[in-house]
Amino acid sequence: MNTCTAFPRISCTRSIAFEIPPAADTWAPKSMRLRYAVVSVRVRMAPSPTGLLHIGGVRTFLFNWLFARGRGGECRLRIENTDTSREVEESVEQIERSLRWLGIDWDGETTFQLDVMERAKGEAQRLVAEGTAYEDEGAIRIRMPDEGVTGWDDAIKGRIEFPNEELEDLVLVRSDGRPTYNFASPLEDSLEGITHVIRGDDHVSNTPKQINVLRALGAELPVYAHVPNVFGEDGKKLSKRHGAVSVDEFRKAGYLPEALMNFLALLGWAPDGETTIMSRDELIERFSLERVGSSPATFDYAKLDWMNGVYLRALPLEEFADRLVAYLRERGVDWDEQRVRAAAAIVQEKIGKLSEFESFAGFLFHDVEPDPELLDARILEAAAGALERVEPWAAAEIEVALKALCEELGEKPRAVYLPIRVAVTGSRVSPGLYESLELLGREESLARIRRTTA
RNA sequence: GCCCCCAUCGACUAGCGGCCUAGGUCACCACCCUUUCAAGGUGGCAGCACGGGUUCGAAUCCCGUUGGGGGCACCA
């Protein structure tokens, strides 16, 4: 246990990691440039354990993580809980699972705001003894300055100042003895030696309060960086109405974690005006707070879909198949694995999300119900005849046979292929016809075609 | 109501006083390729919220207006 230099009066479990070479972090508001000499970096992700992890919050965590990882710093996970119910426990597991799935990790054990409860009470008592805080109907309040301004140089938004007359004497400890968020949170930041508090925009108005708490405590101030909100398409807060909002939902919807991470990173941040597809390592390497924009961003599901498709197509076939198998298993689909792997090859170019596999290749795993309107008995009978003679039963040979059939019938390929496709796959949209037929097998293919003409 | 923040194509953004008749990506439209749908290729549509300044020169700096968001708890 050594004494934290950043917090002389309170000893903390570990000092800031000085072994890491000093790095200079520049912050540049529109009008001026300041330079922070940062010895090392320690950030924290601080979700509330309220159900599923919201994508807006995840984006904030991602910025924390990218920032820390990009400069050899530490990234901690702290749960801002005020109770320890069963729900909280489950919620924490959920949060950790979501973060891991996305590829965001953290250093050390997950901590809890509640851990600091006793410490907070003691500190509050000390402030009362010092006269900077006082008791009020059983609660402890801190005296806020009522003249001048409290301000800071936000690493994203630039200089922000609040008139002190707006600040009320904040409750530090409730009459039931529990510390409030605006006391526990900065206290814990301080105890942990957090150097950069990177959090949502909605905390801007808490910052002057917390700065004053920290000052009263005699603690050093962290650098604050407030990242703008993420909205839904209607400019309102992102909610279920807009589609998937929790990490879990994106996972279920068949998005790849690396695609989601790439997309999220680009919401409010851009390395330049050109680059869009970036690997995890590249994101880490290029991320900087100074390039985080200060205006809110809208979550564009269409762009995410596009990006996910880019990642899906870029996967080596075998890995694509692995992901598909894992995804289907998770979803409780018990289709034959070997067949899924075989089908993977013919759908990779076609789907934008793993979830689309089921509708795209489902015909290989279960019977279909073709729309009679789209069938054509004359063509299907002829097709059955032609396919019967194909030898061997492989895509290339099937192609030759079907092209010959078009000649024979004097029809355009699209006129001939549509009914066959519908009869066999049950849909007008499917993987390539020749490959689909090959995979389905001669017997089943012919059976499906004949059934429609019977 | 008070305080704080924000403002470039429909969306994400580049732009830090001249390189901008504003660039990239998604979406959209057209064409090409093609067995469908995609993917891919080519081209196109589309934007500096408004009004005042400052300056030889403003998307870029300043002020105001309007619009949007956040906050004003013994919630986090």
Image: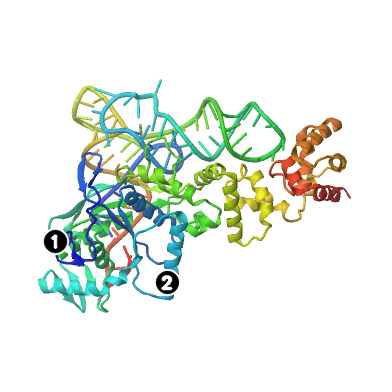
Q: Is residue A215 above or below residue A84?
A: above
Q: Secondary structure at mark 2?
A: helix
Name the chain under label 2.
A
Res A51 visible:
no
How are the colours assigned in the image?
rainbow
Pointer 2: what residue? A89
Q: Do the residues marked 2 and 1 share a common chain? A: yes
Q: Residue furthest left?
A: A130
* Residue at mark 2 to residue at mark 1: CA–CA distance: 41 Å
Q: Which mark is residue A91?
A: none
**What amino acid type should be assigned to the residue bearing mark 1?**
Asp
Please provide percent x and percent y for residue A90.
45, 70
Pointer 1: what residue? A146
Please provide percent x and percent y for residue A390.
83, 39
Q: Is residue B68 above or below residue B35?
A: below
The mark total stands at 2
Q: Is residue A213 above or below residue A177?
A: above
**What amino acid type should be assigned to the residue bearing mark 2?**
Glu
Residue located 43% across and 58% down the image: A99
| Residue A393 occupies quadrant | top right
